[in-house]
Amino acid sequence: MNDIVLYPGCLIQSRLPFLEAAARFILDKLNVKADDIEGFTCCMEPVGLRSLGPETWKGVCARIHSIAFGNRILTLCDGCNMSLSEAGKELSTEHGRRSVSDVMKEIGREVNVAEVTGLLEFLHSNLETIKKKTVTKMDFDLAVFPGCHCEAACKMKGLSATGMLSDIVRALGGNAISIKKNLCCGGGLAGVDAELEKKVMQEAISSAKDAGAIAVVTSCPFCFLQFDMVGRQTTLHIAELVASGMGWEEDAHRHHRTK
C-alpha cells in the first residue's frame, strides 16, 4: 500500500478542527502513519467554487494530485473526496492532462494522478480492526446520513456510502437506521434560497426523527454543520464516534452547537 498523506480540507481545519483531532487519534490507534500534505490549499469544492471557475478548479486539483503522487491522499472531507476524485478521473484522460499542462509547467510540476480515499472508505477498510479495538460500545439508535458529496464520491468507485456508514455504526455496537434515500441537507442552497434550504433540511431531520433515531450520524462536515448549527439537530460525525469508541477521552460534544 502506498504511504498516506493527510488532506483534512479547509472546512474542517477552519471550523471543525476537533474532527481532525479525532481522525488523527484513530490513525494512531490503527498504527497508520499519515504525513501532512505539503503546500496545503483548498480543493475548490465542487458545489460552490468549481462552478465559478472550472479550469481553475482543475488546475488546483492537478497541483494537489502532483504533490501527493506516489502516495495515497486520505481526505477527511467528503467534498474534497468528490472534488479530487472527479478531477483525478478527468486528469487521467489525454484531454484532461493537456488542459492543465501549461499551468503545471509554470509551477514546475508534472501532471500526475494520485489515489484518493475518503475517510468513510478508509474506516470501512479497517472495519475488523476498529471492531477489535473498540473499548466503549456506542449503543445508540443513529440515522445514517452520508450526504450528497459522499454518495457521489462513493458511487464513482462502485461503493455504497450508506452501507459503509451503517457497517461502521454496527461495528461500534450501535443500531444503524436507514432513512429515506438520496436526501440532501440543504447546505448547497445556503445564501441562494433560504426558504428552500430550510425545507430540504427539515425533510431530512424529520425523516431521522420519524425513524426513531436519537441522532444523525454523517461523514460529511458540510452536513454536520448544517444539521448541528442551522437545524439544531443532535448530530455526530463518524470520526468522533469511532474515536470515542476506541477510547478517545476528548469531550467532542462541547464543540457542538446543539447541546
Image (tube, rainbow, N blue to C red):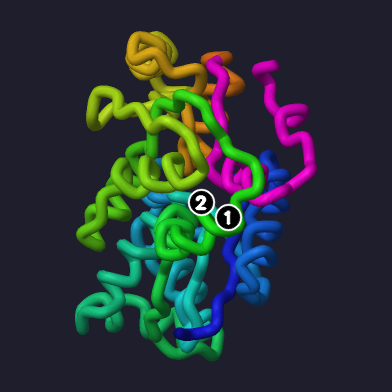
Q: Which mark is residue 145?
A: none
Judge the density around disc 1: few (<14), some (14-19), many (≥20) Cα neighbours within 10 Å. Answer: many
- Rounded to the nearest whole Å, what is the CA distance between mark 2 and mark 1? 6 Å
* CB under 8 Å between discs 2 and 1: yes
- Note whether residue 56 is visible: no
Is 217 placed above or below 54 here? above
Q: Nearer the viewer, residue 215 or 83?
A: 215
Residue at image location 58% in from the left, 74% down from the top:
5
Q: Is residue 235 magenta?
A: yes
Q: Magenta part of the protein: which range?
A: 233-259
Neighbourhood count class around disc 2 (C-alpha, 10 Å): few under 14, some 14–19, many 20 upward = many
Tell me: 238 left or right of 116.
Answer: right
User: Horizontal and vertical percent for residue 207?
Assistant: 33, 15
Instruction: Determine which residue is flagged by label 2.
Output: 77
| Residue 26 counted in the magenta span | no
Residue 99 picture location, percent across and down? 30, 76
Three-letter amino acid code of the residue under disc 2: Cys
Kind of residue indicated by mark 1: Gly
Residue 2 relative to residue 42: left or right: left
Of the pair 85 and 100, the residue shown nearer to us: 85
**Tag on residue 9?**
1
Can the viewer see residue 171?
yes
Residue at x 65%, y 17% (from the top left corner): 258
Q: Quadrant of the N terminus?
A: bottom left
Q: Quick check: 26 above or below 219?
A: below
- Vertically, is 84 above or below 97? above
Task: Classify residue 8 by image quadrant.
Answer: bottom right
Q: Nearer the viewer, residue 248 or 44?
A: 248
